[in-house]
Image: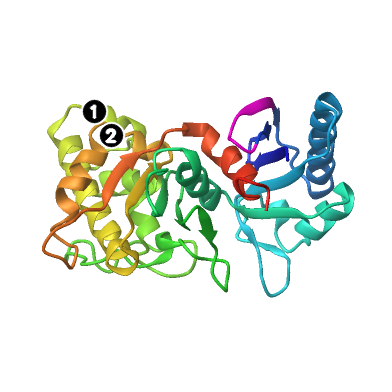
Amino acid sequence: MLRIGIDLGGTKTEAIAMTPDGEIVMRDRQPTERSYTASLQQIHSMVDTIERHLGMRARVGLGVPGSPSPKTGLMCNANSTWLNNKPFQADLEAQLERPVRIANDADCFALSEASDGAGKTGRSVFGVILGTGVGGGLVIDKRLLEGVQGIAGEWGHNPLPWMTPAEYPGPQCWCGKSGCIETFLSGPGLSRAFKTAYGQTMSAQDIAANPSSEAKRARALYADQLARALASVINLVDPDLIVFGGGVSNMPGLVDATQERVGRYVFSDHISTRLVRNEHGDSSGVRGAAWLWGAAGE
């Protein structure tokens, strides 16, 4: 059965129609409507347009920068703040007159790459997002593991492992804790650390490309912090592959530098977990939303 995947972002909303074998047969991308009612109407309109064009009804999956609470059904932790504390899934299902599957955008990224991307050969795949925030998702046997709280894969809000005296106790995080992985490994975290160490204001993108000795040291420290953070994931989950996504993950040489270091921290005499770049890039989120219905739409 045809599946529609929708990626609801803060600035753009993208929809695709995808066949059960992963072929995209239609795509629509629009600026995101930034209010609750307008978001519902926009998604309904995009689904209706695709179905009218293709002449068939589809299952719908949605990736969002947050997740519905399993307890209340209300959206929480969404960067698109107009969704928070609203029964978004229930209201969308009422508008579309069908069940809708919703998952965090990092979960959708992981599911996409595990289904037919860089992690397709692995039985267990952990997908990491390194961008404005730090998120992740865990997929086992091509199925997303969401957890009883719906927070499986939220490694960004664990403390950075094995902090040095210079790192401790870590920056204050928006979640209310200090020293979260996100405060070190997000783009803003890297930029803040560079300014603290060297007194220069520089974006994560500029640090990644800068040839100075200071930027090189910052990149090396970042790779070591990332290796520590991923080692804690490997110690707990022991995945076959870890797939990198998000803008900061595009830092030249980052995957290799982290792979080289991660074995120092893993509780094992060897490491077989492979760290790899993503295959589908910016399309992984919307593809993962479609894959929420599985290869056969189940």
**Real-space Cα distance between discs 2 and 1?**
5 Å
Residue 282 makes an appearance in the image: yes
Residue 155, numbered label: none
Relative side of 48 to 247, left or right: right
**Which residue position holds label 2?**
207
Occupied quadrant, residue 247: top left
Magenta residues span 20-27
In the image, residue 161 sits, relative to residue 279, either above or below, namely below
In which quadrant will I find the N terminus?
top right
Residue drawn at x 84%, y 52% is 98
Name the spot of residue 198 as percent of width and height, x first.
20, 43
In the image, residue 286 sits, relative to residue 157, either above or below, namely above
Name the spot of residue 16 as percent of width and height, x first.
67, 32
Element type where label 2 sits in the image: helix
- Please tell me whether residue 25 belongs to the stretch shown in magenta: yes
Residue drawn at x 71%, y 39% is 4
**Amino acid, disc 2:** Ile
Relative side of 111 to 188, left or right: right
In the image, residue 202 sits, relative to residue 241, either above or below, namely above
Q: Nearer the viewer, residue 189 or 155?
A: 155
- Please tell me whether residue 239 belongs to the stretch shown in magenta: no
Occupied quadrant, residue 117: top left
Name the spot of residue 31 as percent of width and height, x first.
70, 30
